[in-house]
Image (tube, rainbow, N blue to C red):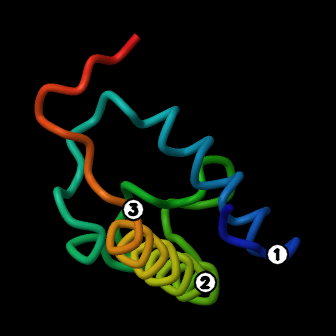
């Protein structure tokens, strides 16, 4: 189970993962949509401080797909009981 992504989308996710790890100690927006295409917190580290508009659009689409997938999964899978014993 998972979300299929294209090579281009995978590359975008790899870049944002590296950036998130690198900037993980900095204050960040609490909502994905509070971050804009010109926001330096998600900019390319080595190239510039601005996330390219096409890449930002691709990340927005992936975010919406992931959100829809999560909501759908939560509707299909029953929650664990409050007294569930994790082992």
Give the spatial CA distance, label 1 vs label 2: 9 Å
Q: Disc 1 or 3, which lies upstream in sequence?
A: 1
Give the SS element for disc 1: helix
Q: Give the residue number, with chain letter if any, for mark 1.
A: 8
Mark sitting on residue 58: 2
Badge count: 3
Q: Residue at x 39, y 62 (%)?
A: 77
Q: Nearer the viewer, residue 72 or 76?
A: 76
Which tag is nearer the camera, tag 3 or tag 2? 3
Q: Is residue 20 above or below residue 66?
A: above
> How would you rate the neighbour count of disc 2 (Cα within 10 Å): few for under 14, some for 14-19, many for 20 or more?
some
- Is disc 3 placed on a helix, strand or loop? loop
Q: Is residue 27 above or below residue 16?
A: above
Question: Gap in Å between the C-alphas at discs 1 and 3?
Answer: 31 Å
74 relative position to 52: left or right = left
The residue lying toward the viewer, choosing from 53 and 10, is 10
Residue 58 at x, y = what percent? Answer: 60, 84
Residue at 44 percent of width and 69 percent of height: 73
Mark 2 secondary-structure assignment: helix
Give the camera-side residue of 59 and 37. Answer: 59
For the residues bearing labels 1 and 2, Cβ distance under 8 angstroms: yes
Which residue occupies 83% across, 77% down?
6
Q: Which residue is mark 3?
A: 77
- Outermost residue, top side: 87
Mark 2 and mark 3 in contact (Cβ < 8 Å)?
no
Q: Quadrant of the C terminus?
A: top left
Using residue 79 as the reference point, say whether residue 16 is left or right of it.
right
């Amino acid at each position: 189970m998972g979300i299929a992504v294209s090579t281009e989308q995978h590359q975008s996710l790899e870049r944002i993962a590296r950036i998130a790890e690198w900037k993980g100690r900095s204050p960040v927006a609490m909502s994905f949509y509070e971050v804009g295409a010109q926001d330096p917190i998600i900019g390319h580290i080595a190239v510039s401080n601005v996330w390219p508009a096409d890449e930002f659009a691709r990340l927005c689409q992936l975010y919406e797909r992931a959100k829809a997938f999560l909501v759908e999964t939560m509707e299909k899978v029953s929650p664990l009981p409050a007294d569930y014993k994790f082992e």
